Amino acid sequence: MKKLFLLLLIAGPLIVCTAQQGKKPADPVQGEYVLSVFGQEPETKAEFPGGAEELLRYIQENLEYPEKHMAERVEGRSFVRFIVREDGSVDDVHVARGCGPLFDAEAVRVVRNMPKWIPARKNGEAVSSSCAVFVRFVLD
């Protein structure tokens, strides 16, 4: 139990981001996670500083496995949505599809505490964008 692997698992691309223009994305339907596109696609999507590998490293280093679930050998996966604002800050973090209060709260905590992202750009200007990640809790 001492060897604990916390992994970030993504369905499709590492993160899903779309341009946002004041509306909320549609909820996932029948287990498929697709974020609605608001207006036109941005020229560049929001990106975690250092890219996907750094995002994975950040989550692995900062995620704490809930002790209760560790003792009971419970695993799970939380799908977390959030907004990357024009200044790169992370906002409106919420669980779109959860796997239990302890896992979900930890996934939200880690996402909420992420460093500023490189924001999406549209017509040369920074824009807010909707993003999502799967956070998977796995014991070895």
Image (cartoon, rainbow, N blue to C red):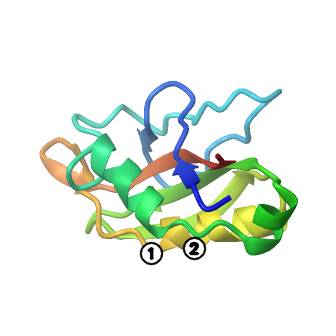
Considering only vertical position in the picture, is 17 above or below 81? above
- State the CA–CA distance, disc 2 to disc 1: 6 Å
Please, what secondary structure does the residue beneath circle 1 have?
loop
Q: Nearer the viewer, residue 47 or 136?
A: 136
- Give SS at disc 2: helix
- Which residue: 45% across, 58% down? 59
Give residue 101's mark: none
Residue at the right extreme? Answer: 72
With 11 as the anchor, is 40 left or right in this view? left
Left or right: residue 63 versus residue 53 is: right
Three-letter amino acid code at disc 1?
Asn
Q: Pointer 1: what residue?
A: 113
For the question of whether residue 46 can be seen, the reply is: no
Residue 130 picture location, percent across and down: 48, 49
Relative to 114, 12 lies left or right? right
List x then y, in percent, for residue 69. 81, 63
Q: Which residue is mark 2?
A: 109
